[in-house]
Image (cartoon, rainbow, N blue to C red):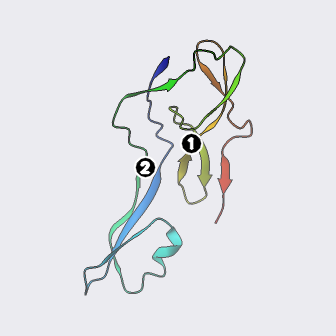
Amino acid sequence: MPLVKLVVPNPSIKSKFAVLQNPITGEIELIHDFRAESSNKGLITVIDFTDYNPHHNQSPYAAYLVPKNLKAGEDVWLDDLIENIVGAQWNQGDCFRLPSCKATWDGNDFILQVPKDGPAIMVG
C-alpha cells in the first residue's frame, strides 16, 4: 500500500560551489571547498561561492510502499527518506540531507529514528 507524503523542502539543506576559469584556455573548474580557491593556479573566479539545494525534487509528493503484512511496532529501514532532515553539517556551511534511517511503523505512518544527538558535525 503506498503511503503518500508531501515533499517539503528544508532550507537548511544546502551545498555551495564556485566556478573558476582559466583566462587563456577558457577551461572551467568547479570547486566546493573554500580551501581550493587559494590554490587556483591563475584561474579567475567567474561565479563566487553560492549556496544551492542539491536535492531538487521534480514532484511535490512521494510515497513509501508499505508491505501488507507490516504490523504496528515493527522496525524497518527506510533507504531513501521522503522527509528532508539534516543528517550532517560541515563547518564550511554545507548541510547534507539524511539519506536513510531506521523507522518504526505505528500502523499509519513511519516514526523515524533520527539520531538523538543531532546531525553529524564534519570538520575539515
Residue at horizontal 27 percent and vertical 83 percent from the top = 23
Residue 37's place in the image compared with 12, above or below, is: below
Quadrant in the picture for residue 97: top right
Residue at horizontal 56 percent and vertical 42 percent from the top = 99
The percent position of residue 48, horizontal first and vertical second, equals: 37, 66
Q: Secondary structure at mark 1?
A: loop
Residue lying furthest front in this view?
69
Q: Secondary structure at mark 2?
A: loop
For residue 111, the mark is none
Closer to the eye: label 2 or 1: 1
The percent position of residue 96, horizontal first and vertical second, equals: 55, 48
Q: Disc 1 residue type?
A: Pro
Which residue, given by chain and number where applicable, does mark 1 sit on? 99
The percent position of residue 19, horizontal first and vertical second, equals: 35, 69
Residue 73's place in the image compared with 123, above or below, is: above
Residue 105's place in the image compared with 88, above or below, is: above
Marks 2 and 1 close (CB-CB < 8 Å): no
Q: Residues within 10 Å of mark 2 (few under 14, many from 20)?
A: few
Q: Disc 2 residue type?
A: Pro
Residue at horizontal 48 percent and vertical 79 percent from the top = 38
For residue 54, the mark is 2
